[in-house]
Image (spheres, rainbow, N blue to C red):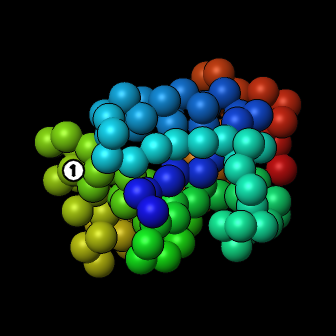
Amino acid sequence: MPGLLIFDGDCGFCTASAEWLASRMGERASVAPWQTCDLDALGLTQANVSAAVHWTDDVGTCRGPAAIGAALRHCDRPWSIVGIALGWAPVTWLAEPLYWVVARFRHRLPGSTAACRW
């Protein structure tokens, strides 16, 4: 299975971010809002995917900044290099709290909707 980035389609910020990634991944991977995915087939729940972005492929599933890193690794350079860097421990230590701050306050970011509030 090619890689799939699963995001919250009700969130304008998430949608814009996913579209940005999709435009740089081309045919190498795809993006889809969780609202259109067969979550059971993917082994995910609505609670999982409404709390964080997920990446799934033949290797497995990851979420949050690890999912963003996996998606970026499928993009053209220089973004694929950023994705590789997101897997390195010092970068991961910074990316993890930053991702959760952005996720927590995404309802305040441009393009967000009331659905972005948890």
Disc 1 designates what residue? 80
Residue at 22% of width from left, 62% of height from top? Answer: 85
Q: Quadrant of residue 79?
A: top left
Residue at 41% of width from left, 57% of height from top? Answer: 2
Q: Quadrant of residue 12?
A: top right
Which amino acid is tagged 1?
Answer: Ser
Above or below, 31 against 52 in this view is: above
Instruction: Assign the N terminus to one quadrant of the image.
Output: bottom left
**Any part of residue 1 in sight:** yes
**Element class at badge 1:** helix
84 or 102, which is in the foreground? 84
- Give the left or right position of residue 109, taking residue 17 as reference: right
User: What x and y, as percent, mark residue 96?
Assistant: 47, 66
Residue at 54% of width from left, 27% of height from top? Answer: 16
Q: Mark 1: give few (<14), some (14-19) or many (20+) Cα within 10 Å.
A: some
**Any part of residue 98 in sight:** no
User: What x and y, as percent, mark residue 56?
Assistant: 51, 64
Above or below, 118 against 115 in this view is: below
User: What x and y, as percent, mark residue 68?
Assistant: 43, 54
37 or 116, which is in the foreground? 37
